[in-house]
């Protein structure tokens, strides 16, 4: 469920960018800040020998993704607990 959500809704976090950027390994090594700036918030696939080696995601995008993942996980816990039997508790029990 989470991977489906992320695959279909990540564009919300990319600002003006509409697709992922692709960059050669040596270019990121040479000037990482330039590569990040040019991607305008989109994730960057870093290639080594023309194969994806890693993905670079700007800090703000990563923070937003982690926040959203936390929200989704909490929502799943709430849904699971809705079907659990209720337990009466008094303040003295706490």
Image (spheres, rainbow, N blue to C red):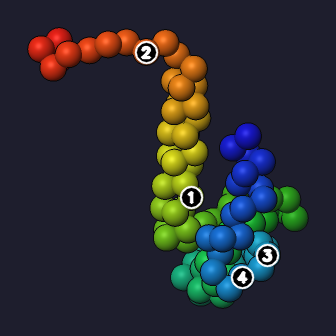
Please provide percent x and percent y for residue 57: 60, 66
* Vertical position of residue 3 compared to residue 19: above or below: above
Q: Residue at x 43, y 15 (%)?
A: 86
Q: Residue at x 37, y 12 (%)?
A: 87
Question: Circles 3 and 4: CB distance less than 8 Å?
Answer: yes
In the visual, does 46 lie left or right of 61?
A: right
Q: What element carries label 3?
A: loop
Residue with the mark numbered 3? 19
Label 1 Cα crowd, 10 Å radius (few <14 / some 14-19 / many 20+): some
Please provide percent x and percent y for residue 23: 76, 75
User: For this rendering, which residue is in front, 60 or 75?
Assistant: 75
Question: Circles 1 and 2: CB distance less than 8 Å?
Answer: no
Q: Residue furthest right?
A: 50
Please provide percent x and percent y for residue 78: 51, 33
Distance CA(mark 3)–CA(mark 1): 16 Å
Question: Circles 2 and 4: CB distance less than 8 Å?
Answer: no
Residue with the mark numbered 4? 17
Q: Which residue is drawn at 49% across and 55% down?
A: 67
| Total number of numbered discs in the rendering | 4
* Vertical position of residue 24 compared to residue 71: above or below: below
Residue with the mark numbered 1? 65
């Amino acid at each position: 469920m989470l991977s489906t959500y992320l695959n279909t809704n990540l564009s919300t976090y990319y600002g003006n960018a509409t697709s992922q950027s692709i960059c050669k390994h040596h270019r990121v090594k040479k000037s990482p800040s330039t590569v990040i700036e040019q991607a305008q918030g989109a994730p960057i696939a870093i290639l080594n020998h023309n194969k994806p080696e890693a993905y670079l995601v700007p800090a703000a995008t990563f923070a937003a993704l982690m926040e959203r993942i936390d929200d989704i996980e909490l929502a799943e816990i709430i849904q699971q607990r809705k079907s659990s039997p209720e337990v009466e508790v008094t303040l003295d029990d706490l």
